[in-house]
């Protein structure tokens, strides 16, 4: 479960990205976050991934208060979260296999296990047999799916995706959303930031609308 209680985030520039946000996402839920540009969608996901810290309020993830999470526990916490960005951040000089292997190598997994896990992840995103290719040889949708495979290869309990279908044509965008739905059906909690209103409405899941609220 992910819970925000009166969470506010102001960047060092003075920009208020989130103001008094209250939110509960149940374990195993799939929900969308929408709202106009600058409403704080990316910021909200970054707070959950501990890439940013709130100025006020309390964030609880699976009964852990993020504020009091010990430094030494942060890598373990992060391993439980798969993050997908719009610009997938793939390494262009590494193969599909190596790109996905990265998080597993960091965790010191045995090579045979890594191989097995990567096959399973590629299978889920329909890219089996493409492991020797380089990102340059892939279409936008395929690159996006490699990014998803990398995010889920650790079998995270929580998946966060920031505009995962931006720049993709509608059919591909739809496919990607269904890939997420399948991960959700396997038990992952999924939170997706998207401003593609038509697409997210078609998914029939909860839609959380962030509004840019100015403090009085
Ligand atoms: N690193 C940063 N430093 C300063 N201000 C930031 C930073 N990141 C975001 N902001 C500001 O915080 C507010 C929320 O930004 P955020 O990126 O979370 O919005 P968003 O809803 O994801 O927008 P978009 O739909 O354009 O991606 C904006 O006003 C933005 O300018
Ligand atoms: Mg954003």
Image (tube, rainbow, N blue to C red):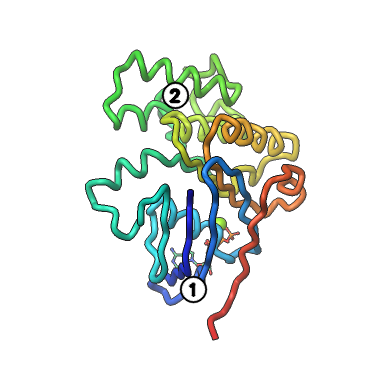
| Side of 154 where 68 appears, left or right | left
Q: Residue at 62% across / 30% down in the picture?
A: 182
| Side of 67 where 172 appears, left or right | right
Q: Residue 151's x, y, as percent?
A: 47, 35
Q: Residue 130's x, y, as percent?
A: 53, 18
The answer to whether 187 is drawn above or below residue 85 in the figure is above
Q: Quadrant of residue 75?
A: top left
Query: Which tag, 1 or 2, sits closer to the chain's start?
Result: 1
Q: How many discs mark residues in the rendered view? A: 2
Q: Residue at 24% across / 52% down in the picture?
A: 70
Which residue was labeled with disc 2?
A: 95
Viewer-proximal residue among 172 and 45: 45
Q: Residue at 72% across / 39% down in the picture?
A: 169
Q: Residue 78's x, y, as percent?
A: 36, 43
Q: Residues within 10 Å of mark 2 (few under 14, many from 20)?
A: some
Q: CA distance from mark 1 to mark 2?
A: 40 Å
Q: SS for tag 1?
A: strand
Viewer-proximal residue among 31 and 50: 31
Q: SS for tag 2?
A: loop
Q: Residue at 48% across / 19% down in the picture?
A: 131
Which residue was labeled with disc 1?
A: 16
Q: Residue 194's x, y, as percent?
A: 64, 51
- Distance from mark 1 CB to nearest ligand 1 atom below 8 Å: yes
């Amino acid at each position: 479960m992910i819970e925000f209680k009166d969470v506010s985030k102001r960047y060092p520039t003075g920009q208020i990205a989130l103001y008094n946000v209250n939110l509960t996402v149940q374990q195993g839920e799939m929900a969308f976050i929408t709202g106009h540009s600058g409403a704080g969608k990316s910021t909200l996901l970054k707070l959950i991934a501990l890439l940013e810290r709130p100025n006020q309020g309390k964030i609880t993830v699976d009964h852990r208060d993020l504020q009091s999470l010990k430094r030494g526990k942060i890598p373990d916490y992060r391993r439980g979260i798969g993050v997908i960005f719009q610009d997938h951040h793939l390494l262009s000089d590494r193969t599909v296999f190596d790109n996905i292997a990265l998080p597993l190598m960091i965790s010191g997994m045995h090579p045979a296990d890594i191989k097995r896990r990567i096959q399973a992840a590629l299978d889920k995103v329909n890219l089996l047999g493409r492991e020797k290719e380089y990102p340059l040889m892939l279409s936008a949708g395929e690159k996006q799916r490699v990014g998803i495979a990398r995010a889920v290869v650790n079998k995270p309990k929580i998946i966060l995706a920031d505009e995962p279908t931006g720049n993709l044509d509608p059919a591909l965008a739809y496919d990607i959303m269904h890939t997420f739905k399948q991960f959700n059906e396997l038990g992952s909690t999924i939170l997706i930031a998207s401003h593609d209103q038509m697409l997210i409405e078609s998914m029939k899941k909860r839609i959380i609308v962030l509004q840019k609220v100015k403090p009085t």
